[in-house]
Image (cartoon, rainbow, N blue to C red):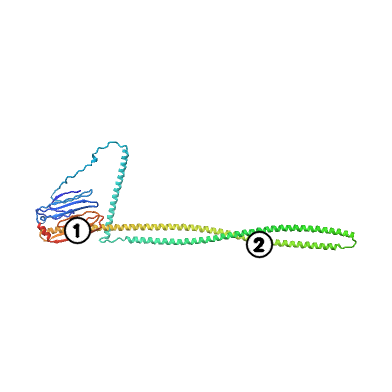
Amino acid sequence: MKKSQRFSSSNVASSKGFSSSSVGGSSSRISISSSVQRGGAGVRSSSSSGFGSRSLLNLGGGSKISSSGFGYGNLGASRGFGGSGASVQSPGIVNVTINQSLLAPLSLDIDPNISVIKKEEREKIKTLNNKFASFIDKVRFLEQQNKVLETKWKLLQQQSGQSTARSNIEPLFNEYINVLKKQLDGIQGQKGRLQSEFNNEQDRVMEFKRRYEEEINNRAAAESEFVVLKKDVDAAYINKVENETKLNALNEQIAFLRALYEQELGELKQQVSDTSVILSMDNNRSLNLDDIIAEVKAQYEDLVAKSRAEAEDAYKSKVQQLQNAAGKQGDELKNTKNEISELNRAIQRLRAEIENIKKQIAKLELSIAESEERGDRAVSDARRKQAEMESALQKLKQEMARLLKEYQELLNVKLSLDVEIATYRALLEGEESRISGEITNQVNVSVVNSASGGGGLSSGYGGNFSSSSASFSGGLKEKKRAVQIVSTTESLRAYQAS
């Protein structure tokens, strides 16, 4: 896109808005050409200007300025400054291209899916409208953010003044991070203390478990001993029953023997009586049978008494032994029962203690789990806050760097504008002084700006003074400026010669 305009005026004005004094001659001519190129990242314009010699030497003449405007993007602008008269040249003939597809005949067939297509088109239009509305909202949001950033930049400029002092927010972040680290250390210490308490409780549980196992072993040994004692008691009871049976049998035997002995004694007495009768009948000799019978009777009585005494002694000794064994075993059984009852009570007590310890362990494990969870939450929260603060600090640093960079760019632009103003002022003052004859030397001013960046706007002026102003954009990395002012008499001579 290129526009050209032509102005004629008695005043000279640059595209920057700096006006020069009225200089003129009989046939002076100032020509300024400008071209605009639109690239991918910005707009670059170059201008060249030349001052004729007669405009600097003669007075009262007319001056002529030829200038071209420029425009870019959807919004085009041309800037020019003119005086009393102006003539505008029309653009040349533009080639017209015709889309051949528009000349093809239209198909008037009705599509059966036209309603579906229209519905889809309506939906697409709605979607595009929504996207456009969201884009507008985003643009408004970005404008608000831009205003906020401008306000922040103004506040930073007010706070910093002429210096670029850094903000003291980093020590606050460091202090907060140190506080969080102290809290983390305290939580870790509490965790270690709870872990030691948990280990102690585990040791106590293991001790109680060992004692419980020992008591179980003692109980098993006591039960086995009780079984053995019960077997012994059963054997003693069986022996007692057997002894009682034997005693009854012996008593019956004694009674039987007594009856037998008495019967034999009666028979002997009868025989003796019969024998005596017979002897008395057969033998007339006188025999003393009473003494013999008494002696035999005494012998039998002694024998019966001895047998009875021996049987009674044996029975009494056996009964005494059985009674002693039964008493001893009864005492042992009673002691065993007491021990078993005590062991049962101890087992019940240990079970109750174990249940209480288990409950305490469960409570401690729950409290430890809660403490670990709280500690993990606190640690994760602290880490999250630390990460957020670090990211915020990084963003603030980046924002500060960007603002400082923009500030530097603005300072550089201001410096370039000041240099251009000073250049124009020096040129005009020198021209006025040369015209009035105050000075004899011409001032040649050259402003060279070198810049590297993604895109922007650049303009150049060439002639007896030349300027190449830098292109600036968001991607500028460095700028170097050099201002060279050279005073020579050759420039004046060149003007005078022309």
Foreground of the two, 428 or 398: 398
Foreground of the two, 217 or 350: 217
Q: Which mark is residue 470?
A: none
- For this orientation, the residue located farthest to the right is 284
Residue 436 x/y as whole percent: 10, 59
Image quadrant where one finds the C terminus? bottom left
Q: Secondary structure under badge 1? A: strand
Cα gap from disc 2 to disc 1, whole angstroms: 130 Å
Residue type at numbered disc 2: Lys
Q: Is 286 left or right of 29, judged from the image as shown?
A: right
Give the number of marks: 2
- What residue sits right under mark 1 in the picture? 448
Residue 410 x/y as whole percent: 24, 57
Q: Secondary structure under badge 2? A: helix
- For this orientation, the residue located farthest to the top is 109
Q: Is 356 left or right of 42, judged from the image as shown?
A: right
Q: Which residue is at a point 38% across and 58% down the rendered structure image?
A: 383
Q: Which residue is at a point 71% across and 62% down the rendered structure image?
A: 317
Q: Which mark is residue 328?
A: 2
Residue 280 x/y as whole percent: 89, 60
Foreground of the two, 269 or 142: 269
Residue type at numbered disc 1: Val
